[in-house]
């Protein structure tokens, strides 16, 4: 049996090793208890040493579904804590999104701006797309700088960056102006590397199966919008 406390392992490595070992069917009940006890000790120590609070830059990217959906979950949590939230949608503004109607119940806590005119293949007007993206970014900056808003969601801004509608340097400079405890979420596929490097939390959604691609099923209310 391996040493339970190998000093050369960092906490993540030790937790990973412990998880692998407790999955072994050869452990006795006592061995399982000791390993789970050690797992708790390592986790408790990490939590005790962690920074209590920091405003995060969060990026949800990748080709899989769920980037905006995950961000809206954080929005809902923030509203539940009584925080003020701002949402700026860069692409989906031609829709009347159902989430906008739902969030109207928190109209004293949330401000919602759908400022795009749809997907780029629908607008077919690059100059107009550039103007809309610029206006959405100026509105976003107002909320990023405003200390009254605890969370700002910039939905599909990564698409605007990927299409070169916005300079990534301008977005990074704007993020640098946020108050220390403000969280900013940036969603959309194709997040630039410079933004990924600047972010505190990055999640890449991986496309495994999709009903439209694999079965020809259209976007459905309650699922896609």
Image (cartoon, helix red, strand yellow):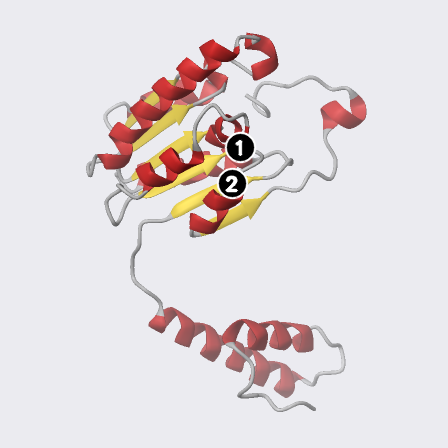
Q: What is the C-alpha distance between the residues marked 1 and 2? A: 6 Å
Residue occupying image coordinates x 34% and y 72%: 48
CB-based contact (under 8 Å), mark 1 and mark 2: yes
| Location of the C terminus (image quadrant) | top right
Q: Is residue 54 left or right of residue 18?
A: left
Q: Position of residue 4 (x, y in %)?
A: 59, 88
Pick the residue in front: 53 or 154. Answer: 154
Pick out the residue farthest to the right: 215
The answer to whether residue 32 is above or below residue 19 is below
The image quarter containing residue 30 is bottom right
* Residue 199 visible within the image: no
Around disc 1, counting alpha carbons within 10 Å, would you say few (fewer than 14), some (14 to 19), or many (20 or more)? many
Residue of label 2: 60
| Location of the N terminus (image quadrant) | bottom right
Residue of label 1: 188
Pick the residue in front: 30 or 105. Answer: 105
């Amino acid at each position: 049996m391996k040493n339970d406390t190998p000093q050369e392992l960092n906490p993540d490595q030790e937790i990973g090793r412990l998880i692998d070992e407790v999955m072994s069917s050869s452990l006795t009940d006592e061995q399982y208890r000791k390993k789970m006890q050690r797992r708790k000790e390592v986790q408790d120590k990490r939590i005790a040493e962690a920074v209590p609070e920091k405003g995060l830059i969060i990026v949800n990217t990748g080709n899989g579904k769920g980037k905006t959906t995950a961000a809206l979950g954080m929005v809902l949590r923030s509203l539940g804590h009584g925080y003020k939230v701002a949402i700026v949608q860069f692409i989906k503004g031609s829709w009347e999104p159902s989430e906008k109607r739902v969030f109207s119940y928190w109209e004293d806590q949330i401000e919602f701006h759908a400022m795009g005119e749809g997907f780029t293949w629908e607008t077919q007007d690059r100059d107009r797309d550039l103007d809309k993206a610029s206006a959405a970014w100026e509105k976003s900056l107002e909320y990023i700088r405003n200390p009254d808003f605890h969370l700002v969601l910039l939905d599909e801004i990564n698409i605007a960056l990927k299409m070169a509608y916005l300079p990534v340097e301008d977005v990074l400079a704007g993020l640098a102006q946020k108050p220390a405890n403000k969280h900013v979420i940036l969603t959309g596929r194709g997040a630039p590397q410079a933004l990924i490097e600047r972010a505190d939390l990055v999640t890449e959604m991986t496309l495994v199966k999709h009903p439209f691609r694999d079965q020809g099923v259209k976007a459905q209310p309650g699922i896609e919008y």
